[in-house]
Amino acid sequence: MPAAPPPGPLGADRLGAARDAALGEAHRLGCSHTELRVERIRAQQVRLRDGRPEGATDDTELGMGVRVVVDGAMGFAATVATGAADAAQLVVEAVEAARVIARAGGDRVELAPEPGHGTINWVAPHDLDPVDVPLADKVALLGEWSGRLLSAPSVDHATAEVLAVTEDKYYADLAGTEATQRRVRVHPVVEALALDPDGGFESMRTVAPPVGRGWEYLSGEGWDWDAELEQLPDLLAAKVRAPSVEAGSYDLVIDPTNLWLAIHESIGHATELDRALGYEAAYAGTSFATFDQLGTLRYGSEVMQVTADRTTPYGLATVAVDDEGVPGRSFDLVRDGVLVGYQLDRSIAATSGSGASNGCAYADSPLHVPIQRMANVSLRPAVGDDPTSGDLIGGVERGIYIVGDKSWSIDMQRYNFQFTGQRFYRIEGGRLAGQVRDVAYQATTTEFWGSMEAVGGRSTYLLGGAFNCGKGQPGQVAPVSHGCPSVVVRGVRVLNTRHESGR
Amino acid sequence: MSGPGLPPAQQVVEDALTAARPGSDHCVVVVEESSEVEVRLANNTTTTSGSRHDRRVAVISIREVDGGMAAGVARRGGDVDVTDLVRVAEQDAAGSPPADDALPLLGPGDIGLSPAPGDGFDQPPALTDLSVLSGVLSGLSGAFARARGGDYVLAGFAEHRRTTRYLGTSTGLRLGHAQPDGALQLVARGAGGATSTWTGAGTAEFADVSVEVMEERLRDRLTWSARRLDRPAGRYEVLLPPEAVSDLMISLAYEASGRNAEDGRTVFSRPGGGTRVGDVLASVPFDLRSDPAEPGLECTPFVTATSSSADMSVFDNGLPLTRTDWIAGGRLHRLRYHRAGAARSTVEPAGFVSNLTLDVPGATGSVEDLVSRTERGLLLTCLWYIREVDPVTLLLTGLTRDGVYVVEDGRVTGATNNFRFNESPVDLLARVTEVGASGRALGREYGEYLNRTRMPPLRIPDFNMSSVSRAS
């Protein structure tokens, strides 16, 4: 980890002035809790279509948000101004917001206790700040990658895109925690498209995950881009020629490039305690994994071990301390297939009598209120390198091996999900037997994880993830990672998506 | 006032244009200033309340380079150092190859716009505060008490936002527009969470929103849920309420990119090349349109583009947005194009307009009228987690949410389980057998992004419910 302290969203003098003004005003107005966040988020997106730049953006968001608890009510206010007087004014507005909802009959809000942790400085490990790389260099690299695909006879169109984000966050609260943190993340995506002369088309994109790394990721640090780009045209050509899948029940071997999303949707969100207690009922939904089943719910088979972790190296939800002053940590959600934990923020920890928060509160912007959000939720691999993906495929007589994520959908209690993928291989007699297409798989969460017969070893493990996890009203969008091995799941319903459309 | 500690937006525009280098270069500045308040509720209580003031400044620098014009875009929030922002945009333009969407910027002579009084570039930013929600909040405190007494639990969200956009160009354009957005959504969950129902409304100023009326609708539907009837997966006659139609039509309209269709990668591509414009899509003479002047759904009437895409161009800033018929009389009529793309394809440009209307001239009747004419069917409340499964057919999957009601012999006789559906909105338009009158409707899922839609209820004779969802 670099020794230099994080730069912070503003100069130390201005941050100190905003802190003193906000916390001083909070003392004066009798707030029992007050936190100030000042954040600068720089986000870049570059997109090429058939090797030509289609659009590029370079956004910097700067602002501050204040949340207070006063007389048992919570209020929030935020602005893009960052002066000391603005910080004090935000406290006044947040207190007024708290009083307005108290008058409308709000219940008393309590936050789980959290001691002050003093000064915390943290920088996510990276070599090259991804937003500092000149646009021309980004266009040149994506153009070169596009050219490799477009030179293949099987590829009619190619798009190439990269998202790069650097976040500088300052946090201070009445309990005495003062944290300055820098996070970085990148997500490059290259997609090839092949037209069918008789109508229709097929596409395939890179399955490289988004990561909490610097620009070095695009130079091969953590991913072999050359190998993936070289294979893509032939994989696409084989997909175009592949037969349409026969709908029915199959044993699935699911690659981590696909499985991370099933974990995100059916475990990550279902074990958010604010959802289970009804606090997201109007939007993201609730959870089948109700609080009364903690310690007893059979979530899946005995091989299922799921951990929530805010310290995962290169994880997109990795921090030193969360947006309520709670240090990042690791804790179990599912042990030997049984639900043993939930993700918490301080309010939900207090409401549910769960003790201290486990550090899962954050906001996507200085202008949004922190809510309970997802840690890096990961499925543990088997001990050692084995079994390999080949070993897992070898144990399947008639099945499908699924690689890469594409379409996803799950209901508001996280029971019924449907996923597609980038490519699908038939498994016959323990061997891959060519691609099929038009595959979607559908299952109910506990039946799916209950049918997970085996998990792969460390050799199959990959940290996947997404930049675009949505929750809350007003909507917040957050990045989060999910690590997992390849797995075998028996007897899953596979649909043919052409037949589903009535064709 | 212009928000705490910020110089006026007009000054930011002028300062940025002044900071842009003189000579052959051009510059566009877009300032978007928004003021928002919201209240969240759950478990029969208000949970959080907030307010925010946001300002985003975008500078688009346009440079002549070898072979054409290149654009660089830089956007920042808050109290912006415009000189620095202009330099970043200029550097990005200098480092970019000629843009495929490049055309000369529009000037006052190209634009026939005459802004309404108080609605032009010189207006101050429109602000909102929690007093806009005072009627909602007082209604809610009574509603919470009634919910506790009635053994059900309310959750929901009320929000109000005013967004003021300012646009200035080095070619002399100065445009401004203020737009209000509001919405109230309420969910009622029966005891034990075994039943739930939802209602939502989009609004400009909340004068037309009544908590009590929405509450009554929720109570009626909870009453329907007293009788539970299980139904298996399969194809059903389905009555889609306007809120469900809204989400499906937003998904359809989003796919209406001309460039993507020409490249062969959407449901609107013609096999072998070209687009399906002119094809009959619908069994009834539907009109699907966007129009900044649509009564009750008025929205920003000119392009403010702070990035380019397949069918939106930063070079088009200030272009008047007018009525665009995506589907006319049941035929695919227009697709989205920026000016340069439209010129290449010899069609008219058509930009993003922030509203959407689906109607059939002369159609009458509410969803209740459709129920009364139904022998056997399912009445939905809304749809959720809608995602594209197959772009070739625009097959979407998603879930029914917060109330699926069984209709028998012209009336609702009970509630049933939720379903996962797999359907294409393009196919649905071709299979509709009955259309009611259109009214303002808030899509449960995509209303968050497109608040202003007007939709009819639809009857679909064979809607594909692919599997049962145990969610309630």
Image: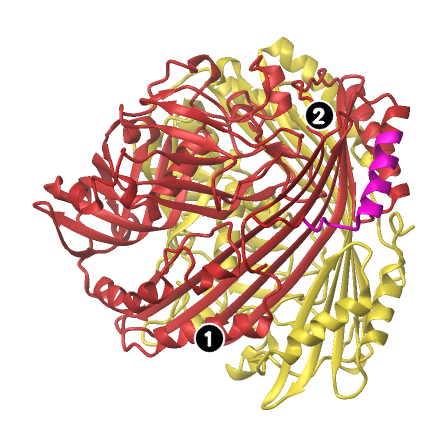
Chain colours: A red, B yellow
Q: Is residue B77 above or below residue A366?
A: below
Residue B452 on image: x %, y %: 65, 49
Tag shown at residue B97: none
Position of residue A494 measured from the top left corner of the image (x, y, whole percent): 24, 42
Amino acid type for the residue under numbered disc 2: Gly
- Dot 2 alpha-carbon crowd within 10 angstroms: few under 14, some 14 to 19, many 20 or more: some
Q: Quadrant of the C terminus of chain B?
A: top left
First reached walking from the N terminus: tag 2 or tag 1 = 2
Residue A503, picture quadrant: bottom left
Label 2 secondary element = loop
Left or right relative to A114: residue B347: left
Q: Which residue is mark 2?
A: A116
Which mark lies nearer to you, 2 or 1?
A: 2
| In-image side of A352 versus A383 (left or right) | right
Let me know if residue A138 is in the magenta part.
no
Q: Height in image: A312 above or below B44?
A: below
- Say if residue B274 shows up in the picture: no
